[in-house]
Amino acid sequence: MWEFLARSLEASTIFTVAALGELIGQRSGVLNVGIEGVMLFGATLGFIAAQTTGSYVIGFLVAIGIGAFLGLLHGFFSITLGGDQVVSGMGIWILGFGLTTYIGNPYTGPLGMERIPTIFGVSPFFYVAIILVAVTWFVLSKTSLGLRIRSVGENPAVAAVSGISVTKTRYLTVIVSGMLMGFAGAIYSLDYNPVWNYNFIMGWGFIALALVFFSMWNPWILLGGSLLFGSLWQLSLNPQLLLPGVFSRYIWRTVPFVITLGVLLMMSTKWFRTKWGAAKPAALGEPYSPE
């Protein structure tokens, strides 16, 4: 039972960190549906760097660096060029899906390094995720930087008139967003499941994307949702631990994705938009031109 709980917390850590990155970007008005692609790049390049150098630190730094670069790339297309943010994000996902398969293929198999020590039986990154949630909430809610980010996400034209640089603020958030997504991918490949394989993220990025909407853009609710989905994911892998003989494991594997689909469908209803629409950044997904 303890192993199930520990693994659930470790899975929720990845969802939390990746979704926090998406939440920060969305609060400034930038949507990145390519979160899975960024995680794939972070997981693959972090895995290769760690295996090649024998250093976890280098592996994580490489993953964070590639995440920052992809965030910057997404920002260039969606902020500077004013392109469709969904198209840009999907391009990153497709690129990640294909390119990481080619790059990582020679490294297929286990990492071959000593596992990262746990703290009280749980991955140290779980505690890092809690700190990141608290810091994100504090910055967005209690600081002038957070006010600028939220202003840009609500009404960039008014923010610009108030002296806020919409472009700089959005670039800052998409870079930080990419860094967290790449970091989440590295946590998966270097700590949670240190075995590289083709497309091994398996839809986690899309679950993280749904979690942002599920959380109504609140970091603490996002943490609660991540804990729920982390537990559901582990239950789908080992249903016999809690519910032996209830459905097959293949049906349980669909549960996290069915719930994700249900959340997204609920978000699209008129009832939800009427009741909770105020939580969504008003300018989300909309390019801004100062002209």
Image (spheres, rainbow, N blue to C red):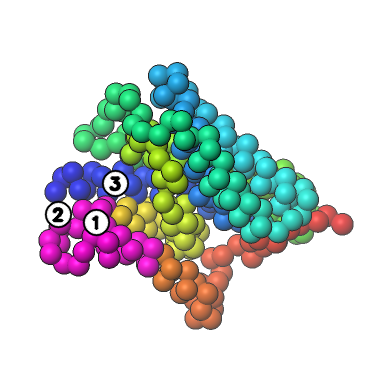
Q: Which residues are magenta?
A: 234-259
- The three-letter amino acid code for the residue at tag 2 is Leu
Name the residue beneath numbered marker 1.
235
Name the residue beneath numbered marker 3.
9
Numbered disc 3: secondary structure? helix
Choose top left, top right, bottom left or bottom right for residue 244.
bottom left
The Cα–Cα distance between marks 2 and 1, rounded to whole angstroms, is 8 Å
143 horizontally vs 15: left or right: right
The Cα–Cα distance between marks 1 and 3, rounded to whole angstroms, is 12 Å
Judge whether 252 appears above or below 197 on screen.
Answer: below
Look at the numbered discs 2 and 1 and tell me whether their residues touch, using CB distance below 8 Å.
yes
What is the x, y in percent for residue 171? 68, 43
117 horizontally vs 146: left or right: left
Which of 22/94 is in front? 94
Q: Give the number of the mark in front: 3 or 2.
A: 2
| Residue at image location 29% in from the left, 46% down from the top | 9
3 horizontally vs 212: left or right: left
Q: Quadrant of the C terminus?
A: bottom right
What is the x, y in percent for residue 176? 57, 40
Q: Which residue is most to the top?
A: 53
The Cα–Cα distance between marks 3 and 2, rounded to whole angstroms, is 16 Å
- The three-letter amino acid code for the residue at tag 3 is Leu
What is the x, y in percent for residue 246? 16, 67
Which of 278/213 is in front? 213
- The three-letter amino acid code for the residue at tag 1 is Leu
Residue 241 in magenta stretch: yes
Name the residue beneath numbered marker 2.
241
Numbered disc 1: secondary structure? helix
| Residue at image location 77% in from the left, 48% down from the top | 80
Q: Which residue is most to the bottom?
A: 270
